[in-house]
Amino acid sequence: MTKVLHGTYELISLMGNVSVKDCVPFVHVHVALGDEDGRVYGGHLVEAKVFVAEVFVQELDVDLRRKRQAGGLYLWDSLTLNDPRR
């Protein structure tokens, strides 16, 4: 179910990852947003306009690739350590 929010919200939490899906970068982000009445909305972030945000990005030394699995979901197929000696 997709819900489109209009207006201004506070970014309470944002967590996700960047992997590779069909040979292109794929961003998978979960978000929690709060409105002025104290209601909280959460789920996958598909698109947003952001005025300001403090974001911490950590690079992992693994190769994250998503492949289509039984049932149609794209899940991590493998976590391969990036070893420069290979």
Image (cartoon, grey):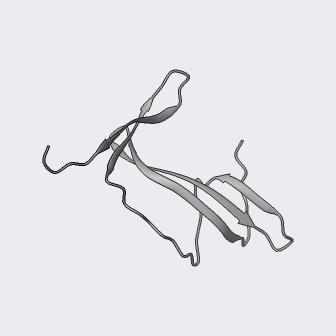
Give above or below for 39 relative to 4: below
Please state the horizontal and vertical placement of residue 65, each as a whole percent of the image. 37, 40
On the image, the x and y values in percent for residue 52 come to: 57, 78
Residue at the far left in the pictured view: 85
- Viewer-side residue, 19 vs 59: 59
**Quadrant in the picture for the C terminus:** top left
Q: Which of the 4 quarters of the picture holds residue 24? A: top left
**61, 67: nearer the viewer:** 61
Residue at horizontal 56%, vertical 75%? 53
Residue drawn at point x = 33 percent, y = 48 percent: 62
Q: Is residue 40 left or right of residue 23?
A: right
Q: Quadrant of the N terminus?
A: top right
Picture coordinates of residue 30, whole percent (x, y): 61, 54
* Image-based side of 62 in relation to 30, left or right: left
Residue shown at 41% from the left, 63% from the top: 58
Exactly how many numbered labels are in the figure?
0
Q: Residue furthest top?
A: 70
Residue at the bottom extreme? 52
> x%, y% of residue 47?
58, 58
Q: Is residue 85 left or right of residue 22?
A: left
Residue 36 left/right relative to 20: right
Q: Residue at x 48, y 70 (%)?
A: 56
